[in-house]
């Protein structure tokens, strides 16, 4: 009953998300400000929360979109979350000799290396341990 009530408003949640994220953008324009730290960053979290809530509702147009790329992003997202800061720092540290640290090329290099690192982590750590988990949990079935 509660789930059915929530699922009716998928596109509205998406619209609320865009409004909250727009407000957060202006509040966080100066990232080191008190307002950004206290109110802006939590607004970003809430805004993306509404976006996810809308996207998982069957009434939202995003729910009906299917893409192998979004599946790949979802698969790699946790590994990217865990490693991106260290990876970006290392890429910038070693490539600054050849590429300007504030350039789009450096940005692209950081993204590509972070995604590649996440792919390696997914294949060498996550997948084998998920298989081990399934083997242990379902050995009696």
Image (cartoon, helix red, strand yellow):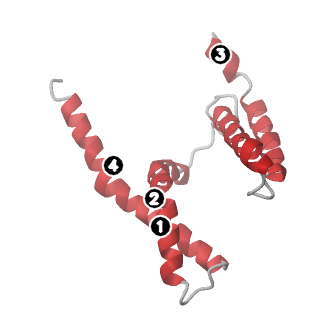
For the residue carrying disc 1, how many other residues have a C-alpha within 10 Å: few (<14), some (14-19), or many (20+)? some
Residue 3 point in image, percent of width and height = 62, 17
Front residue (pair 74, 58): 74
Q: Residue at label 2?
A: 83
Q: Are marks 1 and 2 in contact (CB under 8 Å)?
A: yes
Q: CA distance from mark 2 to mark 3?
A: 37 Å
Where residue 99 sits in the image (x, y, percent)? 58, 86
| Tag 3 residue | 4
Residue at which label 4 appears: 126
Numbered disc in front, either 1 or 3: 1
Picture quadrant of residue 59: top right
Locate residue 113 relative to residue 108 in the image: left or right: left
Report the residue at 67% width, 78% height from top. 102
* 1 or 3: tag closer to the N-terminus: 3
* Residue picked out by circle 1: 87
Residue occupying the point 47% across, 73% down: 90
Is disc 3 placed on a helix, strand or loop? helix
Q: CA distance from mark 1 to mark 3?
A: 42 Å
């Amino acid at each position: 009953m509660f789930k059915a009530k929530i699922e009716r408003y998928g596109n509205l949640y998406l619209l609320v998300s865009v409004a909250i994220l727009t407000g957060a953008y202006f509040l966080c324009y100066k990232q080191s400000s008190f307002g950004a730290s206290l109110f802006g960053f939590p607004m970003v979290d809430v805004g993306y929360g509404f976006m996810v809530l809308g996207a998982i509702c069957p009434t939202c147009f995003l729910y009906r979109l299917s893409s192998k790329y979004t599946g790949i992003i979802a698969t790699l997202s946790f590994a990217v979350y865990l490693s991106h800061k260290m990876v970006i720092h290392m890429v910038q540290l070693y490539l600054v000799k050849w590429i300007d640290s504030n350039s789009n090329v450096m940005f692209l290099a950081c993204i590509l290396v972070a995604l590649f690192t996440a792919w390696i982590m997914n294949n060498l750590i996550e997948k084998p341990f998920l298989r081990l988990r399934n083997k242990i949990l379902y050995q009696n079935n």
